[in-house]
Amino acid sequence: MKPHSPTLEGFRAVFREPALPLGEIAWRWSFGAATSLLLGLSLLEYLDTLPVSVGDLLLLRSRQPLLVSQAITHIFHGSAFRFVMATIVLFFTLALGWTVAASLGRAATLKALLDWFTPRRDDVPDASRLRSPQTGKQHSSMRSLMALNLLRVALILATSLGVVAAAILAGFLFSDADPQPGLVFLLFVPLFVLVWLMWSVLNWFLSLASVFVMRDNQDTFGAIAAAVVLCREHLGPVVAVGFWFSLAHILAFIAATTVVAFPMAFAGILPIGVVLGGVLLVTLLYFAVADFLYVGRLAGYVCIVEQRDSPPEREVTAQPTGPEGTQSFHAPALRPQSDDDIMSDIPLSPPTAEALS
């Protein structure tokens, strides 16, 4: 298989097969809409449980910041336990729903990408021969995908705890006697960046491992190991794909933040509904482009894996032919006669007609 640029192949896949990014957008946005609806209903249900007295209403209607803050404090007093319990229930519910939705969506997307990059040439063996050799027991792809997504959920939870720990650690430098908010901020920022980098790297490996789950039917940890091996053996192409698609993502973000400033500039002229509608439209377009680039980057990684295991092209060398299209015949070289041939015990034979032709 002739090697191609994985980055260009990723863009070519999403442009020629728009169903790939559209399918990714479908399951992501469906889950996002369901999550927003669930969070909104849960918030309304939680607010409905808060007791509001007549005195609280009078304080709220006074529009005085001090009185309003006292009313809000009185309303939310004693509701922390209900809020924490509701947050825990929502987190595990959304985590389970996202695991199922992400597993089904990723399986469909990767299956389509693998079909797109599977060689279909006559001189290439069957695609099943190009897969990595299987060792041990075969595992269910869907079960492995769900395990990978559960690991990603656990990673998000660990990252959140890491950010809280970074804030607590930075807060130790703050004291009432000598407050130094600048020093606290300078300590918190590098800790936050470190936690974010660790999350990004681990989440990237878990995302890449799903390719080997669908392609080679690897189990969870076998797929993670295969992703590490791919990065070790083909670091250059992997970094190139990530760099170019990340650059395109950054440019899309800059363009979106620039365009979103136009409807906000007319906030004092146009109705607020029109302004919010314009901002929402630009935001949705940015999310669509981000999903488009994500599928393209995933296609680039699939291209790297397929090119790694594809057999090299066979070189065909043509045999030299004669004037009539037949193979040329080289006459055997005649041994020159010498004076010793007269005294030789091997009789001399005259040259044949074929040798003279």
Image (cartoon, grey):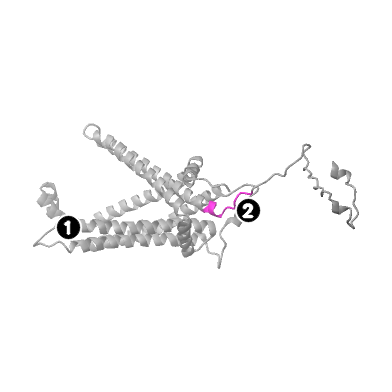
**In x, y percent, where is residue 94?**
37, 57
Residue nearer the viewer, 55 or 340: 340
Q: Quadrant of the C terminus?
A: top right
Q: Where does label 1 land, which residue?
A: 183
Quarter holding residue 186: bottom left
From the image, state whether disc 2 or disc 1 is nearer to you.
1
276 falls in the magenta region: no
- Name the amino acid type tagged 2: Asp
Which is more toward the observer, 101 or 18?
A: 18
- Residue 124 image point, x, y percent: 63, 50
Between the residue at mark 2 and the residue at mark 1, the CA separation in whole angstroms equals 62 Å
Q: Is residue 309 magenta?
A: yes
Question: Which image quadrant for residue 177?
Answer: bottom left
Q: Secondary structure at mark 2?
A: loop
Residue 173 in sight: yes
Q: Is residue 207 left or right of residue 134?
A: left
According to the picture, the residue beneath numbered tag 2 turns out to be 126
Expressed as whole percent of the image width and height from the top left, the position of residue 51 reads 19, 57
Q: Is residue 326 above or below residue 225?
A: above
**Label 2 or label 1, whichever comes before in sequence order:** 2
Residue drawn 35% across the image and 41% down it? 251
Horizontal arrangement in the rendering, residue 111 relative to residue 90 (left or right): right
Binning the other alpha carbons within 10 Å of mark 2 as few (below 14), some (14 to 19) or many (20 upward) gives few
Residue 232, horizontal then vertical, whole percent: 45, 58
Specify the segment rendered in magenta: 305-314
| Residue at the farthest top position | 269
Q: Nearer the viewer, residue 34 or 194?
A: 194
* Secondary element type, mark 1: helix
Front in this rendered view, residue 322 or 103: 322
Q: Residue at x 51, y 60 (%)?
A: 141
Q: Amino acid at mark 1?
A: Leu
